[in-house]
Structure formats: structure tokens, C-alpha cells
Amino acid sequence: MNFSPGPATLPLPALERAREELLDFAGTGASVMELSHRGKEYEAVHEEAIALVRDLLPVPSTFEVLFMQGGATMQFALVPMSFLLPAGSADFVVTGAWSEKAHAEAAAWAKAVGGHVRVAASTEAQGYRRAARPDEVDLDPSAAYVHFTSNETIHGVQVLDPRTRFGECPQVVDMSSDFMWRRMDITPFSLIFAGAQKNIGPSGVTIVLVRKDFLERSRKDLPKILQYRAVAEARSLLNTPSTFAIYLVRNVLLWVKGLGGLEAVEKRNRAKAEALYAAVDADAGFYRCPVEKESRSVMNAVFRLPSEALEKAFVDEAKKQGMIGLKGHRIVGGIRVSMYNAVEPEWVTALVAFMKDFAKKSG
Ligand code: PMP
């Protein structure tokens, strides 16, 4: 029972299929990772993975679907490099560790080219315990874009509900830890990026959804490998992609489709999160979730116990019962339960039973 924040658990059927096909993919006598990325066998996998992202989310034809490398962290650099021009400005909504990082990377680029970055809102003074509300954000209407993090993986804060917008300028969203766990309308956003290693695959591939009209605005004088436009024109085959990671994304998304698509997956995910937070609230004298109720993350639930010693005992005892990945991030401590798509509801049921026992025994 793996509750890891990422790289995270993968659906068993996706792994089993990889095992079956490992030594002989599509009758080639080789594994998919040993085949040319220009060959028809790999290209079919590549196109199927893109088609599944398009079909499941869904992604309309006004957007490009890109597979890139360098993780979400690379996107922290590439977005400003592409869209933050000298004398231009970009706004950041800072709601936790990941939006802080994105802001810092953009600030470095702004300094290099003579542009600006602004913190349009920050919930740091409140300890990153909630989303920023659109009405408390001080936006620059002429900003090149506004960047926000849809789910703060470390602080357990859900920022994006599907209606969230920060003003009228292009919305850039880091969706790394809540990508493709629900069906949603992405058309209000201009660029979305997410590492695959939480909800839809292993590390090594980053999915970028970019609106074609926004793409047109990106700088044309960067090295090609850093240009979204060039990656799009090459259908994410500008250079050798992470073929095996993309293959696994294909397997995971086929599993999602088999479950009934993202509507069914959302129901499953919401039920898991409700059960988990109900267990936290049921023993409120023992467990304490620092995040305000309306901002509690569906993917990453964080909570504290009365002492760090008890938190350590919780993690150690859970491990003995087969539950791993529960230690909170080192900068915040506590417990973090990540409940991405592939976390089985029964695991959450087992964890909830463990939490009840643990509180009774130790409280
Ligand atoms: N943004 C968010 C919201 C994340 O959760 C993470 C990874 N935990 C990152 C960015 C960084 O991702 P990567 O390691 O793929 O660069």
C-alpha cells in the first residue's frame, strides 16, 4: 500500500502489461525501450498516449499536447524563457513550496533579461494553509501571464477548483500533483504542465498542454530544444523522447479508460479523500489537519499528531502493516497521505482503520 507523493504507485494492470511485453513488444523480439523512436511500433505507442490524454481529459484541438523532459522544474524555467520578454512582467500566485520555487526560477530569468516578476498574492503569512482567493489577488492586467499551482503537493492545499481564474491574462498552471484525476474544461487556461510521476506514469516525461494562440507568442530565438513551438511541430519527437516512460503513460491511461474514464476516477478519488479526512476529523484531539477545510487537497492529505515522536511511531508502525510513503515532506514534517489515481480505495480503508487504532492506543 504505497501512499508515496511521487514517484508514486502505478496501477497493477499497467505494470503487468509492461511485464508481459517487456521482452517482446508487438512481435519485435525486443522491448519497447530498445526500439527506435522513429519506428512504427514506437510511433504507434506515442500517438496512442497523446490520443488518450486528448480523449480522457479532454483536450480540444485548439491545444497542443507535448511530451517533454526535465520535469515540472524545467517548466519553471521554460515558461518565463518563452513568454517573459525583456521589459515584460509576469504575476505569481504563491500558495506553497512549489509556487515559491516557480516564482524564484522566473525571477532569475527576469533578472537576466530585464523583465519583472510580481507576487500577485501570497498566503505565506497564513502559513500556506489555504488557496488564494481570486478577490485578494493584486493582478497586473498587462502581465504576460499569471502562474499558479493547482495543488500544493507539500502543503496539501488544493488551489484550483475548475472555476478558478486569476484575472484575464493568460493562465499558466502547474498541475503536477493533480493532473488527470478528474475530467475538466481546460479551455480557460493557456498552458498547463505536469510531471507524469504522480497520476499518470513514471518520472521522465512531463506533459505540457498549450493553447495554440498562446504558443504563437513564444520567443522564436531560443535554441530549438527549448522552444515549445519546435517540440509541437515535431509532435514531441524533436529528439529522442523518454520512450519507456511514455509507453507506461499509455498503459496507465488505458487502465483509466477501462475504469470508466476520468468521471469514474474522480468519484473514486473523492471517496478516498472523504474517508481519510473523516478519520482525521473523527479524532480531532489527536490528528490535526493544518489546511482550512475548503482548501484540503484531494490528492495529498497532510496532518499532524500531538508530537514528532508520535508521528515517527505512526510512520514506523504503518510500515510494519505494509503502508509506505506516509512521512510528510521534510520542510513541513507531519504525515502526508498521497491518494493519486492508482491508490486503491481498500488501502485507504486499511489506513483509516490503522489511524483509529493508533489514536486509541496512543491518544
Ligand atoms: N510542481 C509540483 C506541484 C510538484 O508536486 C512537483 C514535484 N513534487 C514539482 C513541481 C517538481 O516536479 P519535477 O520533480 O518533475 O521537476
Image (tube, helix red, strand yellow):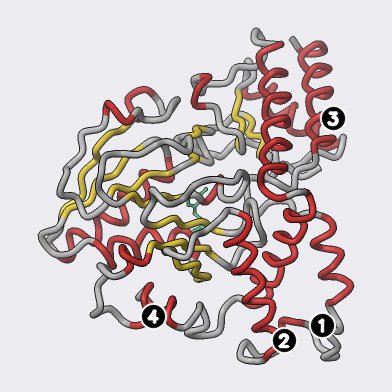
Position of residue 265 measured from the top left corner of the image (x, y, whole percent): 70, 43
| Crowd rating for badge 3 (residues with CA inside 10 Å; few <14, some 14–19, many 20+) | some
| Residue holding disc 4 | 230
For discs 4 and 3, the disc positioned in front in the rendered view: 4
| Residue holding disc 2 | 41
Q: Residue at x 70, y 35 (%)?
A: 267
Label 4 – label 3 distance at C-alpha:
48 Å
CB-based contact (under 8 Å), mark 3 and mark 2: no
| Residue holding disc 3 | 350
Q: Earlier in the sequence, mark 1 or mark 2?
A: 1
Label 1 – label 4 distance at C-alpha:
30 Å
For discs 3 and 2, the disc positioned in front in the rendered view: 2
Closer to the camera in the image, 184 or 29? 184
Position of residue 1 measured from the top left corner of the image (x, y, whole percent): 81, 42
Q: Residue at x 46, y 61 (%)?
A: 209
Q: Earlier in the sequence, mark 3 or mark 2?
A: 2
Tag 1: amino acid: Phe
| Crowd rating for badge 1 (residues with CA inside 10 Å; few <14, some 14–19, many 20+) | some
Q: Residue at x 59, y 69 (%)?
A: 50
